[in-house]
Amino acid sequence: MSENKAFYRAEFASTLDVLGDAITDALEALLANGWIDEDQVFYARLCLEEALVNAITHGNQSDTTRKVRIEMTREAPGDICCIRVCDEGPGFRPETVPLPAGASLNGRGVCLIRHCMESVTYNPEDHCLEMRMRRKGLCRGGAVS
């Protein structure tokens, strides 16, 4: 059995007030561990922000007594990073989120994440959105093997 190694973990209350610091810390971990280049920071920030805002506002309904967790793990074998954003809400299925129509804002975050990441799934047991990308492959296409 292969072993996955976490290189970043954080937990915080469901409030948008701490969002900036949480994203900055996570981006620094991705950069420091060689998962993204400087030219990919924008896309990584976009995906992290969308996933974390959704966890806070939709998952935990901005209930500050509930926590949001983020964990980044290197999956072995291969060179795949799994970014897990977990909340304490009822859960959802990202594959059921339709493409946004016209000026609608609903579903744009999940659509953007799908575009940038190799795969996007939801783990209902852990209440986690799981985003996977190849090393330095964010928004560059390709498939996870």
Image (cartoon, rainbow, N blue to C red):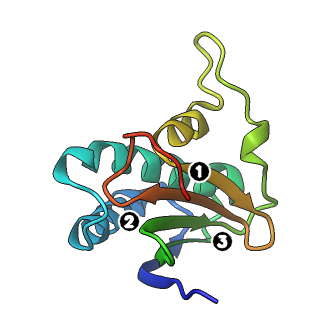
Residue 20 location (% of width, % of height): 34, 57
Give the residue type at disc 3. Answer: Arg
* Residue topped by disc 2: 22
Can residue 61 be seen here? The reply is no
- Between discs 3 and 2, the one toward the N terminus: 2
Give the residue type at disc 2. Answer: Ala
Give the residue type at disc 1. Answer: Ser
Q: In front here: 43 or 12? A: 43
- Between discs 2 and 1, the one toward the N terminus: 2
Residue 70 location (% of width, % of height): 51, 70
Residue 102 location (% of width, % of height): 61, 10
Position of residue 92 relative to residue 140, above or below, is below
Q: Nearer the viewer, mark 3 or mark 2?
A: 2
Using the image, tell me which numbered label, if any, was put on residue 119: 1
Using the image, tell me which numbered label, if any, was put on residue 57: none
* Residue topped by disc 3: 66
Q: Nearer the viewer, mark 1 or mark 3?
A: 1
